[in-house]
Image (tube, coloured by chain):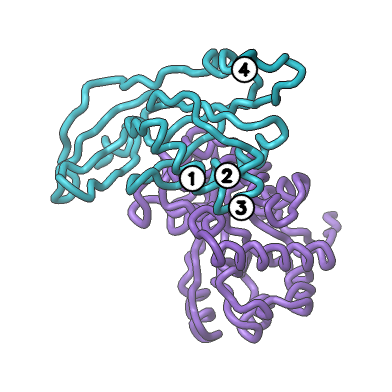
Amino acid sequence: MRPRPPAMRQKRRYILVRILPAGTHPDSKQLYLAIHEAATSLFGDAAIGLAAPAVVFCDGEYAVVRCLRGTEQDLATALATVTFIGDRRIALRTLATSGTISAMKRRMKPVCQTGEASEILLGEKYFTAYHYPCQKVDLIEKSNKHQKLLFFTETDMEER
Amino acid sequence: MNATDAGICPYPAGDSSLRRMAIEAADLGFDSVVAVDGERCALEGLVALRGSVISGQSMRDVLSGLRRVSCATDIVFVDAGNLTFNRSVIPLRGIHILRSIHTTPRNSFDHVSARMAADRGVAVDISLHPLLHSRGSARQRVIQRYADILTLHRRYRFLLTISSHARSILDQRSVRDAEALCALFGMTSEEVHAALKTVGTLLTPRQPVRVLE
């Protein structure tokens, strides 16, 4: 089948989002389902059917969400209302909107840990501490289920 | 104070420390936050103000709560209630913001309350939390309620504040997200920016001109 000529194709927009907390690493399908649920709940089936959202890229830290041109503002609003993927709490931070995926990929800066993960005792619970730039420290409770997440800074850790 | 998140709840009420929430708020475009039961400080290029919440069903509770509020508190919130309660609370000296208006009955904040709030310089808080975390009819009710408040605001010009009521960095949203979420009930970008500046206005209220000799 011959592809449509460019003038007949629907124009698309790509939205770059950062996935919080770092280290969540959802897969594309899970992320799509979360976005679809949030968007449908907010704007309804008809509006989201016309927006045709899709997750075209997801590497754990960043994701690129596609939609039709003219619907990117609505989709960005819906992205702000995504709070869960499955049973894990997340947040999506919209960083940029563009007409090409390559423009989005140029804006992705890898989020690297600044040191080794360490084990700390907080209260009566053990946590694994992951250190990130800007003095950020994410604490994940060492437990088999219902792992508690805490978000501190290096200064907070020194004060304790 | 050009963009203030008028209510965050840091650790131990939430799961994120005040410093971490300050870093996140600065990244999201805010220059100040009001930390409920936090402490007044300057962190990461951002001003954190101390807020206290008075929750009560009756005027007696509110008056005793006002007496307990320490002088270190910058902003005093009162949880809204029914019509009589709101009309009694708004004229009280020392109250800055009426919050949780979306949890009250529809007729609890009417044109008389709106005019009183405008005269007394009391702000009404628009919380983004129910817009993010509720779904279906619950969110529809919140949007209806905020649209009603916005109609009264446009008529009587009382102050509005916008808060995330975030207990975690995952609940915090950017200024642009706040604009998009407030657009759901018809708030314009200019109104959102004015609401984000309201906390600064509350801290330095208009006073009669004094002649110094």
Mark 4 crowdedness (10 Å alpha carbons): few <14, some 14-19, many ≥20: few
Is label 2 in a helix, a strand or a loop? helix
For image coordinates 53% across by 32% down, the residue present is A54
- Chain letter for the purple part: B
Callout 1 touching callout 2 (CB < 8 Å): yes
Q: Which tag is nearer the camera, tag 4 or tag 3?
A: 3
Mark 3 sits on what residue? A44
- Residue B99: name its quadrant: bottom right
Mark 2 crowdedness (10 Å alpha carbons): few <14, some 14-19, many ≥20: many
The type of residue carrying mark 2 is: Ala
Mark 1 vs mark 3: tell me if same chain: yes
Mark 4 sits on what residue? A100
How far apart are the alpha carbons under marks 1 and 3? Answer: 15 Å
Is label 3 in a helix, a strand or a loop? helix
Of residues A127 and A33, the one drawn nearer to the viewer in this rendering: A33
The image quadrant where one finds the N terminus of chain A is: top right
